[in-house]
Image: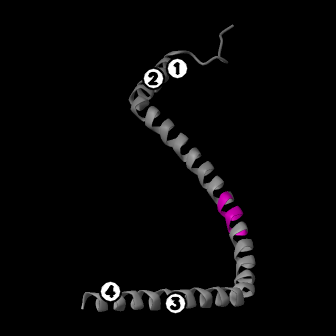
């Protein structure tokens, strides 16, 4: 009985290998038939990828430049904003100093 089971398993394995070989041959034949169509699809896609890559690089460079400028403005504002009370106090002191000084064109003779 065990010999019959082993023989059945070997027959199933042989059948499986034969079907796998037929499937492999079928896949190779279909791939060779479809190769011109794949090449016709591949060429425009390659061109499209190159064009979109160049456009993407330009947009990325522009975005990085604009982002860098905005970052610089943000850093300047973040540094100068805490100094605003000191600038206002300096302006008030300067206006008081200018008001106490005589005007430069009215010298007496």
* Residue 91 image offset from top left, x and y in percent: 47, 26
Q: Quadrant of residue 45?
A: bottom right
Is the residue 75 above or below the residue 86 in the image? below
Q: Earlier in the sequence, mark 3 or mark 4?
A: 4
Mark 4 and mark 3 in contact (Cβ < 8 Å)? no
Task: Name the front one of labels 3 and 4.
Answer: 4
Who is closer to the viewer here, 87 or 10? 10
Q: Which mark is residue 18?
A: 3
CA separation, marks 4 and 2?
A: 102 Å
Mark 1 and mark 4 in contact (Cβ < 8 Å)? no
Q: Is residue 102 left or right of residue 29?
A: left
Is the residue 56 above or below the residue 13 in the image? above
Q: Which residue is mark 4?
A: 6
Residue found at x 67% / y 58%: 57
Q: Residue furthest top?
A: 109
Q: Which residues are magenta?
A: 51-57
- Is the residue marked by circle 4 packed among few (<14), some (14-19), or many (20+) residues within 10 Å? few
Q: Which mark is residue 65?
A: none
Q: Which residue is mark 2?
A: 90
Q: Which mark is residue 98?
A: 1
* Residue 24 image offset from top left, x and y in percent: 58, 85
Who is closer to the viewer here, 97 or 48? 48
Task: Name the front one of labels 4 and 1.
Answer: 4
Q: Earlier in the sequence, mark 3 or mark 1?
A: 3
Q: Earlier in the sequence, mark 4 or mark 1?
A: 4
Q: Earlier in the sequence, mark 2 or mark 1?
A: 2
Task: Name the front one of labels 4 and 2.
Answer: 4
Residue found at x 62% / y 49%: 65
CA separation, marks 2 and 1?
A: 12 Å
């Amino acid at each position: 009985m065990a010999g019959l089971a082993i023989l059945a398993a070997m027959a199933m394995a042989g059948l499986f290998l034969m079907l796998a070989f037929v499937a492999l041959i079928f896949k190779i034949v279909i791939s060779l038939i479809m190769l011109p169509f794949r090449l016709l699809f591949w060429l425009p896609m390659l061109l499209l990828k190159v064009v979109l890559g160049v456009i993407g690089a330009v947009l990325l460079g522009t975005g990085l430049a604009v982002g860098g400028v905005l970052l610089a403005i943000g850093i300047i504002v973040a540094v100068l904003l805490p100094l605003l009370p000191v600038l206002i106090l300096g302006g008030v002191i300067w206006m008081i100093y200018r008001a106490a000084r005589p005007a430069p064109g009215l010298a007496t003779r």
